[in-house]
Image (cartoon, rainbow, N blue to C red):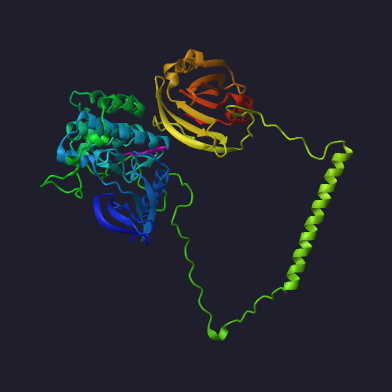
Amino acid sequence: MVAGRYRLRSVLGSGSMGTVWSAYDEFLHRQVAVKEMKVPPGIPASQADELRERTLREARAIAVLSHPNVIILHDVAREDDQPFVVMELLPSRSLAHILRDHGPLTVEQAAAVGIAVASALEAAHAAGITHRDVKPGNVLVASDGRIKLTDFGIARNVSEATMTRTGIMLGSPAYIAPEVASGGAVIPAADLWGLGATLFAAVEGHPPYDADGDPLETVGKVVNGKVPKPKSGPLADVITALMKKEPGDRITLREVRHRLYPLQTKTPLDLFGPELFRTPDGKKTSAQPDATDTQVIKTVLPDKPEKKAGESSSELATDPGPLPFLRPPTPAPAPAPAPEAATVFAPPPRLSRRGTAATAALVAIAILLFLLAAGGGFALARTVGGQPLLPPAAEPRTTPNGPTDVPAPSLVQQSGDAGYATGTGGQFGLAVPEGWQKFVAPHSTRLGVSTVVQYVSPDGRRSLRLERLAGYFKQFTGEGEYITWLKQTYPSDAFQLFGPEPAEDGKGTKLTYRTTEHGTLPDGGDKAVTRVTFVYLLKSGASLWVLSVTAPVEQEDATRQDVFDRIATTLSVSD
């Protein structure tokens, strides 16, 4: 029994990073999956504690994901100081086991898998989470047609490095991205490679690189060898476009879905028949690990010093606040006094019922006198000034699209990283409206690959967006190319540009544009929604930073004065 609630029943799978159990939730009376986290052998005690803490932090980050193609995380429990991750139990088989027992998938089956995994990764990346271990073993296919991505257990905060200072690398050698295998930054583009390698295995029946030999040898082939080519077919172009050595050359997840949708003409329920969920006689059971399981690889990193005793790891994710289940140290019980030295304390005197009532009455009278005095003074001042006692009722200015007046938000200073999509630089400081929700996602256009950090107002009507186009000024001489691209993004009759003009600070450029979107109402009529966007363009080194605030056109003046003008002056960047 874990945490007095989850009763472990049987092992579903086991690897170097943990064991997954089928379990029963005694409180909610439902089946769940419980992952028991393991500490790799040979890890010092201090780093073992760090790994456990990271597990709790990552679970907290992953819990924000709610997507039909992502396994749901229910809870994180602790038993004997060991973390247990409680997840949705999906009666299914992993894609790795299906490939092992039944061979390659058909084109439609592989397309369905690709669409599901790409959708799951889009949701994860939008939340700032990189999976880092996309492979057939982490893709679950259920007999009812559901396809889900699981095991975000080694998913990292995007600011973390690939290897720790002791040279430990986590991942599946046959599916790990070249830049990750070589010790580069962990960025969302690594998941694109993993998706491509998974689709390669789906159509070929084997991983792109040999995982039967030494893991370091396999990693060497990934880093230094040629990228294997899939056999010709409808998915070959997608796989090739994903498995590019340069992260910036890989196609986006949205493009993957656009290319795969036409290839799937049936539902997954019809594509994955019951025969795929029976293990043929003589095959190994699913509890036995595959050769492509996640592994812990010890490498020699001469340029990274060993961590000294007591030194904290720079790779540890940012502290999100108090972690669950942390108990304050229990103070040692005070020694009981000897009987002969015992002191008898008399209880404090109690107020009589009459004294308590009298005290309450006096307080009430004092408050009443204060209110009467304040109210009388206010009324006297209004009367002498010839003003009515009550102010006129304010009429809120509204339009069919919402209120025109919105209160000026309070700003809070924040810092972040807008460079993880490219792996270099990108630190910024910015005051953002308090209470606006943050989202982080990669963005790929003909101007290059970038990272978008976006903040959305609670009502969803206004948004703040910060984007860094790394290396922009290595290709273009000014902001004109960005403005040209911006115009081409919208239909000519739905885009109106004002500017550009130099910013007041003399450093950047400002421009404003309006866009109109049309939608169909339930009664068949047309609804046009016009939005206004204020933009601040700033050059830093070879990068172009784009700060923009978008709002309904009815809130144009309030948004410019109370949000954009105040925020633009707070932006600080380092390239």
- Image check: 510 left or right of 116? right
Residue 264, how many percent across, how many down? Answer: 26, 28
Residue at image location 45% in from the left, 57% down from the top:
326
For residue 552, side relative to residue 264 (left or right): right
Residue that lies at the very extreme toward the left in this rendered image: 282
Magenta stretch in the rendered image: 128-132
Q: Determine the image quadrant of residue 299.
A: top left
**Which x, y percent locates residue 57?**
41, 48
Q: Which residue is at a point 31% across and 36% down the rendered structure image?
A: 180
Asked whether residue 477 appears in the rendered view, the answer is no
Q: Position of residue 396 (x, y in %)?
A: 67, 31
Residue lying farthest to the front in this orientation: 523
* Number of callouts: 0
Q: Main secondary structure of the magenta part?
A: loop
Which residue occupies the foreground of this view, 11 or 300?
A: 11
Which residue shows up at 69% across the image and 76% down it?
349
Residue at x-position 39% and y-position 31%: 421
Taking 361 as reference, is 164 above or below it?
Answer: above
- Residue 254: say if magenta: no
x%, y% of residue 290? 19, 44
Quarter holding the N terminus? bottom left
